[in-house]
Amino acid sequence: MSEKSVIKVFIADDHAIVREGLKQILSDTKDIVVSGEAENGSDALRLFRKSGCHVVLMDISMPDRSGIEVLKQIKKEKPELAVLMLSMHREDQYAIRSLKAGAAGYLTKQSAPKELVNAIRQVASGLKYISPALAQELANHVGDEHQLALHETLSDREYQTLTMIASGKTVGAIAEELSLSVKTVSEYRARLLVKMKLKNSAELTHYAIKNGLLD
């Protein structure tokens, strides 16, 4: 197989066991090789440039910067590069946000190995990849932009803060997990409460449960 026909993949995920699992899956293919990896967003931005990759596999939840933030930066630098988002979250939580931010596709980490390989080949060819379930979700939203749910008006960080508060985490714990100051997370919380017309964390949690935003 010629070098030109080989798809080079860069993996960005903060869990070593996940990175090793992905590399093991891709090692069984003849046309896909792993050309680099990173364990956080900052390293991903620094190292993907050196990898000569055609596709980036990007975890949405990383310790220093969210995958969507890194995605946006990568697309600024290399608009043509295909970024395939990976997440533990259900598709209806982050997939549409990812696609709007420039992702070439979205897969949950529960996806079958064959689906991952097919998705990489598809986005490397310049196409988008979405699952049949997500395609139906997108079809259901056609023409509904004027009826956005309140949580869909939030920024990516505000939405992430919402789901973490609703899952029972304190502002301090969220700040530590996201490598942010308590003041910054408190500002996100205050902004999202205003945008969603909610009074406190209890109402926020009730909203998240009612709208199926928690795993």
Image: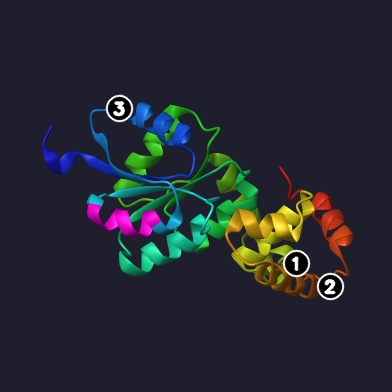
What label does residue 197 carry, if any?
2
What is the magenta segment's predominant secondary structure? helix
Q: Is residue 143 left or right of residue 85?
A: right
Q: Residues within 10 Å of mark 2 (few under 14, many from 20)?
A: few
**Disc on the earlier residue, 2 or 1:** 1
Nearer-the-camera pick, 114 or 159 = 159
> Judging from the image, what secondary structure is the residue with disc 3 in?
helix
Residue 191 screen position, x and y as percent: 73, 74
Question: Which element carries disc 1, helix, strand or loop?
Answer: helix
Residue 166 image position (x, y, % from top left): 78, 53
Residue extent of the magenta highlight: 43-50
Residue found 83% across the figure and 60% down from its top: 204
Q: Are marks 2 and 1 in contact (CB under 8 Å)?
A: yes
Report how far apart the C-alphas of labels 3 and 1 lie in the structure.
Answer: 43 Å
* Residue 110 in sight from this viewpoint: yes
Residue 27 is marked as: 3
Q: Kindly identify the amino acid type of the residue bearing the numbered disc 3.
A: Ser
Q: Is residue 53 magenta?
A: no
Residue 139 in view in this figure: no
Query: Which quadrant would residue 158 be assigned to in this image?
Result: bottom right
